[in-house]
Image (tube, rainbow, N blue to C red):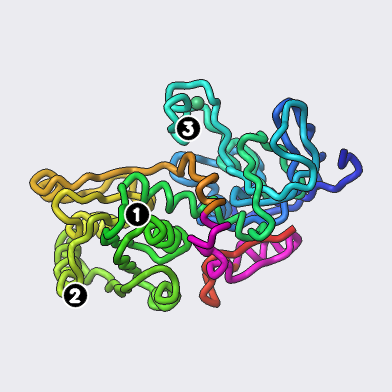
Amino acid sequence: MAANQVNRCVVLNKPLDIVFENRPVPEIGHGDVLVNIKATGICGSDVHYWLSGGVGTFIVKKPMVLGHESAGVIAAVGPGVTHLKVGDRVALEPGIACRMCEQCKQGRYNLCPEMEFAATPPFDGTLCNYYRHAADFCYKLPDHVSLEEGALIEPLSVGIHACRRANVRSGHRVFIFGAGPVGLLCAAAAKAAGAAHITIADITASRLDFAKTYCTDSQVLLERPQQGEPNIEYSRRTAAKILETEELSDVVIDCSGAETCVQTSILLTKNGGSVVLVGMGAQVQSIPISEISSREVDIKGIFRYCNTYPMAVKMLASGAIDVKPLITHSYPLEDAVKAFEHARDGRDNAIKIQILG
Ligand SMILES: [Zn+2]
Ligand SMILES: [Zn+2]
């Protein structure tokens, strides 16, 4: 099975050093499938690993294949796999949980301590021709959903999970900080969940121009803090200015990780509303605790997602969510370095850059 095939892999050798390696086509065992990867989106975390060799507490200590937002075609199925066959087009959920621990049994398998997640050290990612994956973490795509759309289910899952954690419901007002791919996909998920009004804020005007065309009702251009201005003063000033034209929101989703945005998120939330922290910024931040206590604002962390893929596949299939407009650029596998440089620079209004192989 595919033994004579080439398996080109995009390997992060060390920071700022991406190389191509021909690795053996992986062997598959019971419950596995071999996937011929066709589309992979570049994520902010991939760019971080490339530039600095680490994301938060995850540090690349040995060469690692990059990429985790992928879709492809089944090239082989291992013993015990009954729901997939050779030729099926699938989206890959890139984290394999143990399926045995307390978190897994409660259905919150994203919190599994044994999680093996693609392109999170020490585990290799999906930017290769052939990837071995557990069949139960591969989701068949309907004929009219493209592999490029399938590769966007991973970041879309973050948006769906954020909206679920915040209980976004029909009629809600939702405010989102950060108009990059994840912020936009949070908007798409909130809209699909019935949000009546979605506002998005960013410091980059061109991102808001795009957001105007995608799932949001109003857009706020944020100013940068003034020189020497304490964060909380900036945040209070910014919240007051936003509230001249906006109402308080049922749910605020911060996709920036910036302390000022986290503070402003709390100030923009209705009494009894929720703030979801999606962005990852400074590990320790100062937040207005009195607002949280006296107004019962719920602050919720999220770690990736769980149980989102089946729903996401259905939403793409029905048209409830359209991710196609986010795919602004694509590169062949051999031009992976160019694709990473493009993602780093963000030029030409890039939203999601994909590598097609
Ligand atoms: Zn990602
Ligand atoms: Zn587990």
Residue for point 14% across, 68% down: 240
Whole-percent x and y of residue 242? 20, 71
Whole-percent x and y of residue 263? 22, 56
Residue for point 66% across, 67% down: 330
Of residues 58 and 136, the one nearer the viewer is: 136
Whole-percent x and y of residue 323? 53, 63
The answer to which of marks 2 and 1 sits earlier in the sequence is 2
Measured in 3D between alpha carbons, the distance from the residue under mark 2 to the one under mark 3, in whole angstroms, is 41 Å
In the rendered image, the quadrant that contains the N terminus is: top right
Residue under label 1, please give it.
Answer: 257
Label 2 sits on what residue type? Answer: Thr
**Residue 115 drawn above or below residue 298:** above
Q: Are marks 2 and 3 in contact (CB under 8 Å)?
A: no
Residue for point 66% across, 42% down: 63
Of residues 205 and 218, the one nearer the viewer is: 218
Residue under label 2, please give it.
Answer: 245
* Left or right: where 286 falls relative to 135: left
Residue under label 3, please give it.
Answer: 109
Whole-percent x and y of residue 215? 41, 68
* Left or right: where 61 falls relative to 34: left
Measured in 3D between alpha carbons, the distance from the residue under mark 1 to the one under mark 3, in whole angstroms, is 24 Å
Total numbered labels: 3
The answer to which of marks 2 and 3 sits earlier in the sequence is 3
**Residue 144 drawn above or below residue 163:** below
Q: Quadrant of residue 32?
A: top right
**Label 3 CB, ligand 2: below 8 Å?**
yes
